[in-house]
Image (tube, rainbow, N blue to C red):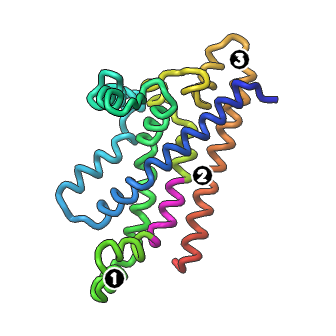
């Protein structure tokens, strides 16, 4: 039987992961489309920046978020003074850190869908008089859908396990920022917490595996439904 603290950590992880996906997907769609279709020199720079979270230590990402969005950060102070928004030490900040860490996964999945689509479809629509936004919403976006869904589910599963950036940026506050991996870390540091750590590890494993399998199934079914 799970304790109240364990259930709270699980529900908080699900909430943070969901909010991070909802925040990152719209931006990921635009970035992936631009990376796949643009021939600008700046594309290489943006591509490198997007994928930085995959190669930098998560603690570094958390530190950069702290510098930018902390109460004395470049944007954090302005957000707090102007809109009353505080990200540091809050679950909103945990969602931001998770979104940054999983953003490359969403972009990569969507970009693969865009690059595998036939660009002749967009060109045919253009010759028929469809404007840029019409082509995007009626042709490009539907072709992106397998990548959008697969990337979103993968990012959700990865977000459930994000640790380094979250604990660096928003700390480990029970009921506010103590997500599933942070609760596991706390259990390992607590005398007699081995049983709780084992339960949380099993839950993390199950959720992560389910997310990856769901992502693959969605991608396959969408490709099959679209005749690809």
- Total numbered labels: 3
Q: Which residue is mark 1?
A: 120
Circle 3: element type: loop
Disc on the earlier residue, 2 or 3? 3
Contact between marks 1 and 3 (CB within 8 A): the answer is: no
Q: CA–CA distance between discs 1 and 3?
A: 59 Å
Circle 2: element type: helix
| Closer to us: 188 or 157 | 157
Left or right of 59 in this view: 35: left
The quadrant in which residue 70 appears is top left
| Residue for point 42% across, 55% down | 26
| Residue for point 29% across, 83% down | 126
Q: Residue furthest left?
A: 41
Q: Main secondary structure of the magenta part?
A: helix
Q: Residue furthest right?
A: 1
Label at residue 193: 3
Dot 2 crowding, Cα within 10 Å, few <14, some 14–19, many 20+: some
Extent of the magenta region: 142-152
Q: Residue furthest bottom?
A: 128
Disc on the earlier residue, 2 or 1? 1
Label at residue 212: 2
Percent of width and height locating residue 24: 43, 49
């Amino acid at each position: 039987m799970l304790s109240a603290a364990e259930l709270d950590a699980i529900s908080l992880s699900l909430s943070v992961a969901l909010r991070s996906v909802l925040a990152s997907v719209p931006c990921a769609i635009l970035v992936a489309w631009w990376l796949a279709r643009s021939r600008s020199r700046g594309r290489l720079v943006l591509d490198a920046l997007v994928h930085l979270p995959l190669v930098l230590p998560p603690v570094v990402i958390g530190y950069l978020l702290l510098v930018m969005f902390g109460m004395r950060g470049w944007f954090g102070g302005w957000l707090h003074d102007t809109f009353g928004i505080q990200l540091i030490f809050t679950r909103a900040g945990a969602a931001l850190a998770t979104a940054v860490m999983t953003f490359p996964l969403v972009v990569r999945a969507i970009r693969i869908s865009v690059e595998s689509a036939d660009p002749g479809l967009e060109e045919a629509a253009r010759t028929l008089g469809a404007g840029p936004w019409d082509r995007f919403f009626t042709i490009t976006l539907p072709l992106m859908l397998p990548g959008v869904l697969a990337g979103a589910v993968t990012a959700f599963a990865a977000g459930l396990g994000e640790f380094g950036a979250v604990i660096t940026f928003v700390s480990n506050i029970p009921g506010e920022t103590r997500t599933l991996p942070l609760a596991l870390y706390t259990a390992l540091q607590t005398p007699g917490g081995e049983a709780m750590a084992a339960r949380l590890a099993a839950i993390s494993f199950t959720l992560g595996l389910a997310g990856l399998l769901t992502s693959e199934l969605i991608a396959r079914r969408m490709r099959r439904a679209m005749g690809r």
